[in-house]
Image (tube, grey):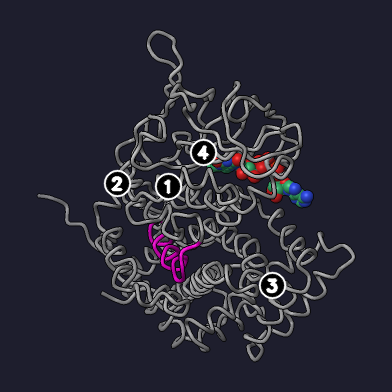
Amino acid sequence: MREEVLNQSPPYVDIDLYGSDRPLQDAVAANGGEGGAAALSTFGKRWGTAEMFELARTANENPPQLKAFDARGFRRDVVEFHPAYHQFMAESIGAGLAASTWREDATPASAPAQVARAARFYMAAQIETGHLCPVTMTHAAVAALAGDRELAARFMPKIMSRRYDPHFRPWWEKVGITLGMGMTEKQGGTDVRTNTTRAEPAAEGYAITGHKWFMSAPMCDAFLVLAQAPGGLTCFLMPRFRPDGSVNGLSFQRLKDKLGNRSNASAEVEFADAFAWRVGEEGRGVRTIINMVQLTRLDCAIASAGIMRMALAQAIHHARYRTVFQKHLVDQPMMRTVLADLALELEGATALVMRLARAYDLGANDPGEAACARLLTPAVKYWICKRAPGVIAEVMECLGGNGYVEESVLPCLYREAPVNAIWEGSGNVMCLDVLRALTHEGEAARAVLGALAAEAADLPGTRAALEVLERGFSAQNAEAEARTAVERLALLAAVAALRQSAGPEVASLFARTRLGHRHGAMYGTSEIFDGDARRLIDRALPAA
Ligand SMILES: Cc1cc2nc3c(=O)[nH]c(=O)nc-3n(C[C@H](O)[C@H](O)[C@H](O)COP(=O)(O)OP(=O)(O)OC[C@H]3O[C@@H](n4cnc5c(N)ncnc54)[C@H](O)[C@@H]3O)c2cc1C
């Protein structure tokens, strides 16, 4: 006789990732995206199918492989990905995640393009994040390419294509292309001015020689690369094939053996007289590529919020079915407080990333919103990406032993959690960037702070937070205090965003427990009363 399996939660699959997420719906609506709700729900249902969960497992259990040489010793320099990875690429590109916020002339599409894409990106990240690396880089690269009208005009039609084309062919022969980037070298990722890769003017462009220590998604069709030109550090677009159709001078040395992000490849690469076009002026490389980096930072925050959301949903789902000491876990007062505290964390994260996406939507025509995007992007990336590992670790525990086992999605989410904090500007670098924004955009940045203070004025803890900000940002040794101040800034922005989306009650609760210090070091120590706890949990995931 077969053993009867008792007291286990059913699989968390075949769900509408949008329709089951009230905080997301509220944040999308508050930021101008309500009109797209039906389409977002269609996307959410598709990505929440059991099939997509299974594809994600397969893509991560079968990491890409470098095929550096063929049988006769000729260089191949291709990376083979599992079909499941290709399917995710096709789905994401088909849904516009790589280009839907742009027009074909590389100018921004009108609002709410960013919010609509951010909501989809948030849902896609819940299922599979590795493939989102080239998707986000392709999307963000347009912001750098836009600086060169001629290059943009040639590449945009292929970037805008909603068709994924995995063939290793010259970009002009493909129906759609993806773009990556290579900045980090062995001696420095943050301090890219130490780049030693050299660029010499050559026929039709430049010849680039050197190396990159991290270059992810190496099967992209072209890469934005930094190299030292005669006029200083410069941004280039380096295609996999030269204009004459021959394979360009990129040799992949190794793929990184990474903690997570396993469906995606990150290569170490050498360039030998690799052909590239210059993007922007010589000596203005950082200035050119920073436009791209801002957008990838936004995506890091959205993706981290997404993986935290999947973890939270798994925890609530499990706690509704699992019985311990004659009660469902969700009805055990201490577990309920833990879940509610995690749900409150996600309320803030979701509201914050959608509000930030709105700032990008409006920034092209509204200098105040552009300043908001400039100041808050590093603060939000810092805060949200660094919260992810803690949230996911707590959720693992909610699932008990099952949460630690590979078949549950938690180990994959946990391995993924730290990467967004590290790449595209690690934590300290984000805090330094907030200080830079305050210095360089003084008045506009101060106006953003003033607006946040006004929006959250009557909520608990706001005044104290503003004092910390004021003291921290004007301190003699501002760098040493920057983490404290940036944390307060992100929380203040979350409170303001929550007030617009989830409403004053949730905003007040968030402010009281986060800004007002009514919590300890662990989740489950926030002062959340029982009625509020139940409401937060039901908002996060309605009972089936
Ligand atoms: C999975 C993965 C994929 C990646 N893909 C790419 C890619 O496609 N392209 C690419 O170009 N790079 C990529 N990177 C590299 C990544 O962007 C860098 O690792 C990152 O920018 C940090 O650079 P670094 O490793 O050289 O560390 P460092 O620059 O040496 O920094 C180390 C630490 O010092 C801190 N720090 C730096 N300066 C200061 C300061 N002034 N004060 C205080 N603290 C400071 C940083 O915050 C960090 O914590 C990838 C990395 C990973 C993990």
Labels 1 and 4: the sequence-earlier one: 1
Between disc 2 and disc 1, whose residue precedes? 2
Mark 3: which amino acid?
A: Arg
The residue lying at 45 percent from left, 37 percent from top is 220
- What's the mark number on residue 55? 2
For marks 3 and 2, the one nearer the N-term is: 2
User: Looking at the image, is mark 2 or mark 4 nearer the viewer?
Assistant: 4
Q: Is mark 2 within 8 Å of ligand 1?
A: no
Please give the residue where the numbered disc 1 appears in the rendered image.
159
Marks 3 and 2, Cα distance to the nearest angstrom? 39 Å
Q: Earlier in the sequence, mark 3 or mark 4?
A: 4
Q: Is residue 508 above or below residue 47?
A: below
* Highlighted range, magenta: 108-124
Mark pair 3, 4: CA separation:
33 Å
> Is ligand 1 closer than 8 angstroms to the Cβ of mark 4?
yes
Residue drawn at x 78%, y 79% is 467
Residue 112 lies in the magenta stretch: yes
Residue 119 is situated, as x and y percent measured from the top left of the image, at 42, 66
Identity of the residue drawn at 67% across and 27% down:
201
Q: Nearer the viewer, residue 254 or 249?
A: 249
Quadrant of the snapshot with the C terminus: bottom left
Q: In the rendering, which numbered label is found on residue 216?
A: 4
